[in-house]
Amino acid sequence: MNSRALTVLALRATAVGYVVCLILLPLVVLGHQAFLNGVGQFLDDITLPQAWSALVLTIEMALIATALNAVFGTLSAIVLVRYQFPGKWFLNSLVDLPFAIPTLVAGLMIAAIYGPTSFVGAWVERSAITILYEQPGIAFAMAFVTMPFTIRALQPVLMELEPEQEEAAYTLGAGPWTTFWKVTVPSVLPGLLTGVFLAFVRALGEFGSIVIVAGNIPMKTQVASVYVYGEIESYNPRGATSVSIAVLIVSFLALLLLERMTRPPGERFFITAARAESRTP
Amino acid sequence: MRHFFILTVWLYFGVLLLGPILYLVLQTFGEGWTVFFSEITKPEAVHGFKLTALITGIVLVVNILLGTITALVLARQQFPGRTLLSGLIDLPFAVSPVIAGFMLILLFGPDTLLGTLFGAAGVKVLYALPAMVLATLFATFPFVVRELTPLLQTIGTESEEAARTLGASEWQVFTKVTLPAIRWGLVYGATLTVARSIGEFGAVLVVSGNILLLTQTATLHIYQSYVDFNYAGANAVALTLLATSFAILAVLEMARNRTTGRAAM
Amino acid sequence: MKIEIRNLSKKFGAVQAVTDVSFSVNEGELLALLGPSGSGKTTVLRMIAGLETPTAGEILINGQRVNDVSIQDRNIGFVFQHYALFKHLTVFGNVAFGLKIRRWIRPKTEERVHELLTLMGLEGLGSRYPHQLSGGQRQRVAIARALAPRPSVLLLDEPFGAVDAKVRQELREWLIRLHDDLNVTSLFVTHDQEEAMEVSNRIIVFSKGRLEQIGSPAEVYEDPATEFVARFIGSMNIVEGTVRRGKVEAGPLEFPTPAIPDGTSLRIGFRPYYVKVSEDPSHFRQQARLRHVYFLGVAYRLEIETAEGLLLRSRMNKEEFRQCRFQAGQLVSYAVTHYRILPQEGVTGYALETIPLAGP
């Protein structure tokens, strides 16, 4: 019994110690650095025109990418769960690919096909929009790296959706439309929201693919993470710290909002990407 | 309607995923095999692959060990601060890689307490292997933990207790009962760790200094080649990593099927 | 092996799961821990196994205090409610697990496992995996696994809870035979009073973490020590009333209560088979209306309602029932032939024996 209690304590100390050193300590240092000279200084730093435009652009692009994935990801999840068609297995195994591909490689691929030198890019540019080195490229890169979130969050929920619930609604006199909105949507919504918000947060921080695709022109196509990188490279830790903290605050607010909206049965503070990626045990 | 939906999904996958992949493959091999091989066998490229493999190996071992321990603690122990610990583990998902790297610079920079300490001890952390490993550890820590914690919770403690009543020591309980039950989850989490370690770029770029033949990983080499307008070089190494991604994807699929298959029975 | 439990208590945080429980189990006994869910019976079993640490009290196995002995060293066989079979091991691997931990040599292990598989009626299933077995088979594998290392005590937590009714009946009979053959001291937890009565030599009844009564099935049934036991085991009619002039009046019924002071509030209980019912409205003194007849297979249960609205249950065997021609709704006469004053707070030591009433 005693040796067991000792094991329990040793394991706990290891886990807590490791997490505190690896994750908490760096964050505390960053927070400390950001507010070293007061909140006023912090606000001044992030409202510098270049910093502010990077932050706004990042949020805008992340919202566009998220909306895109929310719509098409939901459709994909439904199609992949409910329909049988040739190639279904193929598409289903591809879903996780953006998690497996280095984001830098993703950027490279997007730059290659949608750049002006490729026939595809030239055709798109003539008929619709310029993607590479312009804002659409940023949204596109963000959409690529966050593609699995919505699909993987929705698939298990859709699979577990018991037909009995919908049938019960029918026997109680609800029509198909009412049943969809009152029974199906509420049971799928937490999954959808989880996927969408995680994708948004992930898009906010994206760097590797964007640095290739965006062109990184200040005030025009420079996102927050690239701005932070630039500040670090030019030995301006204060600017880097302030914008970093600003991005982190937006991320945490998004996660808190998600927590509020889904209020899971567990006690977890942040809902994880792992949940979106993992299937039901 | 049905066909329209299916077509839309194919289009979505095609534009976003399949098109770019196929184009990269075509473009790289459009240059010819010889270019491809000469690019990936350049000393810089080879060094990049080796460094990436080294970092991935270290990170994998640490994550499997400490990730499993942390998951066990989260799933099996109740203690004050447990919720906070659980929340902290999810944090790296919400932190941009560049910011993660920057935090390490703040922590280990030459003017800081830790930086001075390690400097005095003669250990170079920043712009060297330790910082690159730390940055990758930060980004990948959640994968194993988040895969194993729910799994451990679902399998419950009954089998472990049964093993104890049959005389098994704590270590025997873990190796003979717990580990076999979670092994595919562990494979899944470990594979995600490998994928992310190989692909990590932002954090490593910030803390490594990107020194040629010293701290330049495979992804950094791609970036450097791209910036230097050596597109053939960038594409060749990128394609090699892409092939690794597909292998990783195959393992992920297998692990996913194994775990769901086991849970179903 | 003899087990002795002395003043055992267990708290989970603020929840008192077990309070001051003492009892002993004799060598070779088959004992049931009976109680509703949350009564603390499983916690007691888990403390004996070493899976929980007592907050207070002592556990002695063969006279030796084992509180500080680890689970691994208690040499106990434990059968879990949901079997807890190792999914990644075959039936053979499961049964051999404890032997391998004890480093038995391979031929001896194989011999022992085959011996147990034969004993359990599992021949030929050694290479199957748990998910390829039926519920009853899994349960038997779980018992075989627990028995393999020759434990001094076998502990079973709701052993038949997770199988369907027919298999449960088979397993009960089979456990009795197994116990007769092996004669290993066994304790099992159940919430099913019928199961406890049928299988065990003695029953320990728990309620809210306290021990209510220990006794043979007959003792616990015929002579419940507390009102809880009376209600929990078997069916009982219960009426309430206040003692006036040496008796309690409850509606049309009168129960003499000798030696209890007037004004005492009492509860009177009587088993359904002590309520005699006749189709002749004048056969017994009291009349009632027959509300419903339930066919129970071996007997009938009648539900009658007095003019005052009191509902009473009566039990009648088939022969008795056949001699009458009952029709739901008809007027019948009835009498309560025996009753007991139920033990309760403030009224102790009275008339725990059944009191016969005068005839019609």
Image (spheres, coloured by chain):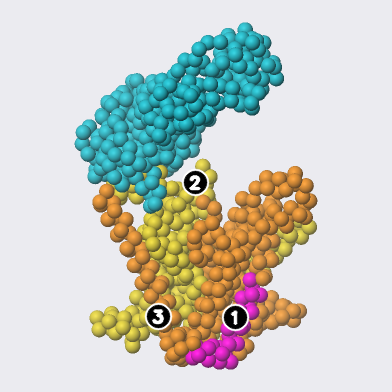
Chain colours: A orange, B yellow, C cyan
Q: Is residue A58 magenta?
A: yes
**Whether labels 2 and 3 share one chain:** no
Q: Are marks 2 and 1 in contact (CB under 8 Å)?
A: no
Label 2 and label 3: CA atoms lie apart by: 44 Å
Which residue position is annotated with label 3? A29
Classed neighbour count for the residue bearing mark 3: other residues with Cα under 10 Å, few (<14), some (14–19), many (≥20): some
Residue occupying the point 64% across, 60% down: A189
The residue most toward the top is C323
Residue C214 % position (x, y): 36, 28
Range of magenta residues: A40-66
The mark lying in front, picked from 2 and 3, is 3
Which residue position is annotated with label 1? A58
Instruction: Tell me the SS state at disc 1.
Output: helix
Q: Nearer the viewer, residue B249 or C279?
A: C279
Which chain hosts label 2? Answer: B
Can see residue C280?
yes
Which residue position is annotated with label 2? B262
Q: Quadrant of residue A209?
A: bottom right
